[in-house]
Image (cartoon, rainbow, N blue to C red):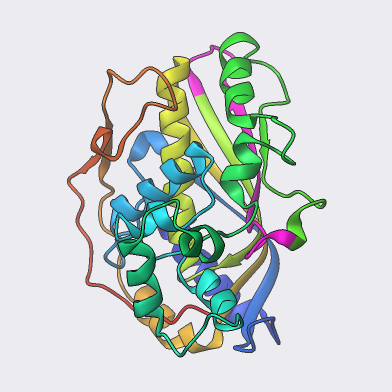
């Protein structure tokens, strides 16, 4: 994972300091690409402690087409909580609840409770666009699987999460917005390229790399290929100013050997994977590093 540390170094040394939507401030570069050979191991960062389960649960949530945090909250996955909470704080129903109290209420209530439906909802984010683009019944995931199996050399193996017609209705417009897949000439390997318009390099990018490497491996299995390469193309690659010190600490650590991804070989449909079908082996890492989320 030296590629990731080189990205961090490039931003710190060559980026420009910019104001941003969150008010935190960033150092940013525009246009950067890294490549990860998935045959060499699963690209889960080793220079800080990471956990595959929340990454996999979020991906399964996308594939389900779900857009309410209830699914994630019930599984103790916290990565989306801040955005609906910020919306809740501006509502007439807010009475000083903390983020933790808000999340606990979502967890205690049923999925069909009016509070969960109203305040757990993120709008038409990834899952909706992946499985029901523009609310027109266009299932991009099913179409992708069909084309990978039946038209492997197509240049249209694409999933697009960026929808200009609905982007203003989303709690957070898609950062990882455009995916394209590529089958090798011998029809043995599947590769994926992600275009990410905006990348929080310390907190978000390690998740994104692992998530789309996992998605590539899952698709490869159900379509009869082997996962080959994940290519990560970033538009605005930035490090928040309050992450500078922790990023420098991370850069001082020498990457360790990569772990191996193990998928349940009995799963034949992309829609049948559960968290129990996704495991890693031989993961080793340095200790945890913490940074604040800018919302």
Q: Position of residue 65 (x, y in %)?
A: 54, 40
- Which of 269/290 is in front? 269
Q: Foreground residue, 272 or 180?
A: 272
Quadrant where the C terminus sits is bottom right
Side (left or right) of 156 relative to 27: right
Q: Is residue 37 visible?
A: no
Residue 51 visible, this orientation: yes
Is residue 54 shown above or below 86?
A: above
Identify the residue at the far front of this view.
114
Q: Nearer the viewer, residue 30 or 181?
A: 181
What residue is drawn where x is 30% and y is 54%?
75
Residue 196, image x, y percentages: 64, 55
Q: How many marks?
A: 0
Taking the image as shown, residue 55 lies to the left or right of residue 170, namely left
Identity of the residue drawn at 45% across and 69% down: 81
Look at the image and tell me in which quarter the N terminus lies.
bottom left
Indicate the quadrant where residue 182 lies.
top right
- 158 in relation to 85, above or below: above
Q: Residue at x 31, y 66 (%)?
A: 47
Asked which quadrant contains residue 121, the reply is: bottom right
Q: Is residue 159 magenta?
A: no
Q: Indicate whether residue 185 is drawn in magenta.
A: yes
Please, which residue is most extreme toward the right here?
165
Q: Which residues are magenta?
A: 169-189
Above or below: residue 81 compared with residue 295 = above
The location of residue 200, given as percent across then percent down, is 55, 69
Q: Could you tell whether 170 is left or right of 259 in the image? A: right
| Residue shown at the point (39%, 65%) measured from the top left | 106
Residue 220 at x, y percent in the picture: 45, 24
């Amino acid at each position: 994972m030296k590629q990731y540390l080189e990205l961090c170094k490039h931003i710190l040394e060559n980026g420009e300091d910019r104001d941003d939507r969150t008010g935190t401030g960033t150092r940013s570069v525009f246009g950067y690409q890294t490549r990860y050979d998935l045959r060499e191991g699963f690209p889960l960062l080793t220079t800080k402690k990471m956990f595959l389960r929340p990454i996999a649960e979020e991906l399964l949530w996308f594939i389900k087409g779900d857009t309410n945090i209830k699914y994630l909250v019930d599984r103790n996955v916290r990565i989306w909580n801040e955005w609906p909470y910020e919306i809740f704080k501006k509502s007439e129903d807010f009475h000083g609840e903390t983020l933790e109290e808000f999340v606990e209420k979502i967890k205690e209530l049923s999925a069909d409770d009016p509070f969960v439906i109203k305040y757990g909802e993120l709008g038409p984010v990834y899952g909706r666009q992946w499985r029901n683009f523009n609310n027109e019944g266009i299932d991009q995931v099913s179409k992708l699987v069909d084309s990978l199996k039946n038209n492997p050399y197509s240049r249209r193996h694409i999933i697009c999460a960026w929808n200009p017609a609905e982007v203003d209705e989303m709690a957070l417009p898609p950062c990882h917005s455009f995916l394209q897949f590529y089958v090798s000439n011998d029809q043995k390997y599947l590769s994926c390229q992600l275009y990410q318009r905006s990348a929080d390099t310390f907190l978000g990018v390690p998740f994104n790399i692992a998530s789309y490497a996992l998605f590539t491996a899952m698709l490869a299995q159900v379509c009869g290929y082997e996962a080959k390469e994940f290519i990560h193309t970033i538009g605005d690659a930035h490090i928040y100013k309050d992450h500078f010190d922790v990023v420098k600490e991370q850069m001082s650590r020498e990457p360790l050997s990569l772990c191996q991804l193990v998928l349940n070989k009995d799963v034949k449909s992309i829609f049948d994977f559960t968290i129990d079908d996704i495991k890693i082996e031989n993961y080793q890492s340095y200790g945890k590093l913490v940074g604040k989320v800018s919302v």
